[in-house]
Amino acid sequence: MKLAAAPSLPHPEASLNRAFYLPRLDRSFYQGDAVVHWTLPIAERGTGWLNDAFHARFRELMLHTAAREGLLCPAYCLMPDHLHLLWMGLRADTDERNGMAFLRTHLAPALAPQQFQHQAHDHVLRDEERQRGAFAATCFYDLDNPRRAGLVGHPRDWPYLGAVIPGYPTLHPLAEDFWEKFWKLYAKAKSPAAGHVKRGDAPRSSRREEAPFKRRTTDEA
């Protein structure tokens, strides 16, 4: 199985440098049935905040965000100095940038005294990356982060990863039957109108060919 490339993180000195912003895609790329890989670095790679209480608060807020914006999260992984999650939009009025602003704002107190870097990073998945096999590989790459970092021998041993599918608290992305169940739930939950959002044009400059939709975005609306 071919794995997705690892998302890059900026140099720690950039975490508090507001001049470090890069252009964002048109807002339409984050709306409707958009599928986006998000990375939330901690400023100056701060650690010491990741524990069971933070994980519980994260899952609670992910459920609230899912209800507000119409989202499913088939995979997330909380690492000692950053967070990964994938969101899939379900409604015509879904806006993942709004969702990220809500999540970061309400999760920040649980992170204290550490702070989020002033920008979340995003990668809007292209059509070929949304194919089921490719998408599952991207999710597994995130879930395998703790093993690659030498924190555990297998990702199932890392307590701070999972999925957030409202109404299905026991679904786990490392379970053998997860994807069969997930795709059925996704098809049932997704509104047909979510796929009819008109997208703006992607920027023609300041982008890499291998990842043309990769951008950093703030938590601002």
Image: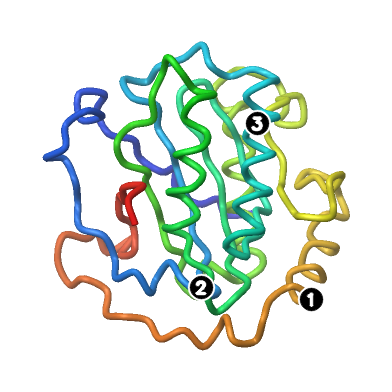
Q: Nearer the viewer, residue 108 or 11?
A: 108
Q: Secondary structure at mark 2?
A: helix
Residue at left offset 86%, top offset 50% = 176
Residue type, label 3 = Arg
Which residue was labeled with disc 3? 57
Task: Give the mark nearer the N terminus: 2 vs 3.
Answer: 3
In the rendered image, residue 109, in percent from the top left (x then y), is placed at: 49, 25
- Quadrant including the C terminus: bottom left
In space, the residues marked 2 and 3 are separated at their CA atoms by: 34 Å
In the rendered image, residue 63, in percent from the top left (x then y), is placed at: 68, 48
For residue 129, side relative to residue 63 (left or right): left
Residue type, label 2 = Glu
Which residue was labeled with disc 2? 128
Q: Nearer the viewer, mark 1 or mark 2?
A: 1
Residue type, label 1 = Lys
For residue 22, side relative to residue 34 (left or right): left
Q: Are marks 1 and 2 in contact (CB under 8 Å)?
A: no
For residue 18, side relative to residue 182 (left or right): left
Q: Residues within 10 Å of mark 3 (few under 14, many from 20)?
A: some
Residue at left offset 68%, top offset 53% = 74
Task: Give the mark nearer the N terminus: 1 vs 3.
Answer: 3
In the rendered image, residue 78, in percent from the top left (x then y), is placed at: 58, 31
For residue 157, side relative to residue 17 (left or right): right
Q: Nearer the viewer, mark 2 or mark 3?
A: 3
Q: Nearer the viewer, residue 31 or 209?
A: 31
Compared with residue 179, is residue 113 higher up or lower down, i.e. above or below?
A: above
Which residue was labeled with disc 1? 188
